[in-house]
Image (spheres, rainbow, N blue to C red):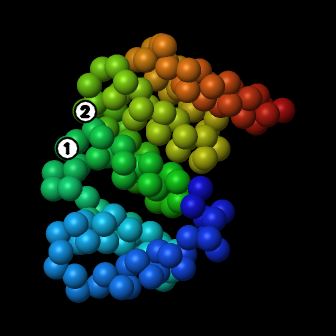
Amino acid sequence: RKESNNDLFVPYLKAAVETTEGSEEKEVVNYRKWYEADYVLFVQGDVEGAVEVKKANMEEGWQKNANQLNNFAWWCFENSINLDEAYTMAQKGVDLAAAGNEKANVLDTLAEICNLKGDCDEAVTLIHLAIAEDPKNEYFQKQAQRFEAAALAQQN
């Protein structure tokens, strides 16, 4: 997670965002948008503001696109913020996702959020749904082992 590397990346993040302020160069503007929410979160320390900036900088129509919903939910998961809304967005992403790997990836995000929130049993259920969508993906198999171990530890 980013929070564990704050000392390393915050000075670079700060410099990148602050030195590009006011740029009209399309590529610079796009990169700045990509990092602006992290800047608000880690440099300014404003969780709610960061979530709003993240939403504002998402592609138009993002709330109707499984991959974009997943990207938002994953960003929230990575930063351990806004987890209830991230869960809702990931659920919506599962409903919109195409069968197979796309749906499996969103289910994995949803499982990660559940696990982080302490609902290890639901995480296990969700990752098994991901495996059913993409049974040859070894990553999901490893995720299942991790979530199952967490669920077992939670029961003891």
50 sits left or right of 55 in the view:
right
Q: Is residue 33 visible?
A: no
Viewer-nearest residue: 10 or 119:
10
16 sits left or right of 66 in the view:
right
Q: Position of residue 95 (x, y in %)?
A: 29, 31
- Helix, strand or loop for disc 1: helix
* Disc sitting over residue 96 in the figure: 2
**Residue 80, relative to residue 25: is it above or below?**
above
Q: Which amino acid type corresponds to the residue marked 2 in the rendered image?
A: Leu
- Residue depicted at 43% across the width and 17% down the height: 134
Q: Quadrant of the N terminus?
A: bottom right
Q: Is residue 127 visible?
A: yes
The image quarter in which residue 98 lies: top left
92 sits left or right of 1 in the view:
left
- Helix, strand or loop for disc 2: helix
Q: Position of residue 90 (x, y in %)?
A: 38, 42
- Residue depicted at 23% across the width and 86% down the height: 22
Circle 1 Cα neighbour tier, 10 Å, few/some/many (<14 / 14–19 / ≥20): some
The image quarter in which residue 144 lies: top right
Circle 2 Cα neighbour tier, 10 Å, few/some/many (<14 / 14–19 / ≥20): some
Q: Which amino acid type corresponds to the residue marked 1 in the rendered image?
A: Lys
Viewer-nearest residue: 97 or 136:
136
- First reached walking from the N terminus: tag 1 or tag 2: 1
Viewer-nearest residue: 32 or 41:
32
25 sits left or right of 138 in the view:
left
The residue that disc 1 covers is 64
- Disc 1 from disc 2: Cα separation: 7 Å
